[in-house]
Amino acid sequence: MRTGEELTRTPVALTIAGSDSGGGAGVQADLKAFARCGVHGASAITAITAQNTVGVSAVHSVPPHFVLEQVRAVVRDIGVDAVKVGMLGAAEVAHAVAQALDELPRGTPVVVDPVMVAESGARLLDSDAQRALTTQILPRATVLTPNLLEARALAGAVDRAAERDGEAEALARAVLALGPGSVVLTGGHRTRAVDLFVTPSPEDDASAATAVVVELDGERQRDGASHGSGCTHSSVLAAQLALGRTPLEAAQVARALAGEAVAHGLRDVGSGAGPVDVLDLAARRGVA
């Protein structure tokens, strides 16, 4: 955590992600999560989606050079303490984001949420963009936050209907071998709602086979609303890194706050999967 004089400066987290017109996921969810953590949020939009709680009806990619210019403008004036990377959409955008990450001050933590499929099931990443994500973005990530389905896709595993025993840990290790500093395989699509934090062993930091695995337990919120849960989780994690927490500490806070956001989810908003509520709007309105 930050101490002394560092506490007088407002930390800044930058989200590089797509816009959700329904306000439940993407950049909109990221900025809410940053605010919940007491961190100023800045944004570089990679794509504009026509989206609601039912689905995504259209996607418009932002030109790659303009994505890069957005990041440069923020870094040049405001500065950045941590970055969250979400929806990329196109391979050309992924390449631009990789360049943007290389231009950040050395040591800036980067959280990557490998957004591939929307909560509604709409595909948000084509095959060329997935290859660019794997080769250009993952090796630049401090923490990667896939769910079970995304981990299967990244590891080239068969997409099964149900989780097999030991599958999540094996996938997390396989994804760690692709280059990120650590992996948090989230529990939302697992049989048990347990996140797995996987990081290289201090004794053998080159091998994913000997990586340290920590279970981050939590309750499954069956009556909650989950649209934007992955975005919220990764953004809380990035905000905690901006505040000076270690990746494991940040992952623990992210698990707790994302679970609360689902539990407080806005089931009365839209006719599909309602958005998570990391700001607890009902409590702010004085609703019990």
Image (tube, grey):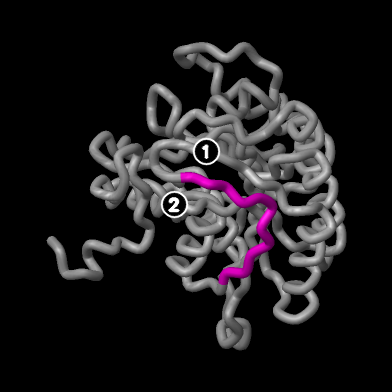
Q: Which of 191 and 58 is in front in this view?
A: 58
Name the side, left or right, on which 274 lies relative to 2: left
| Residue 251 seen in render | no
Relative to 15, residue 185 above or below: above
Q: Which residue lies furthest to the left in this view?
A: 288
43 in magenta: yes
The amino acid sitting under disc 1 is Ser
For marks 1 and 2, give the CA distance: 12 Å
Relative to 58, residue 39 above or below: below
Measuring 55% from the left and 17% from the top, which residue is drawn there?
A: 167
The amino acid sitting under disc 2 is Gly
Where, quadrant-wise, is the N terminus in this rendering? bottom right
Query: For numbered disc 1, what is the local secondary structure?
Result: strand
**Dividing the picture into quarters, in which one does residue 151 lie?**
top right
Magenta range: 41-51
158 in magenta: no
Q: How would you classify the magenta stretch by its main secondary structure?
A: strand
Give the residue pinned by disc 2.
22
Name the side, left or right, on which 169 lies relative to 161: right
Residue 176 percent coordinates (x, y): 71, 33
Give the residue pinned by disc 1.
57
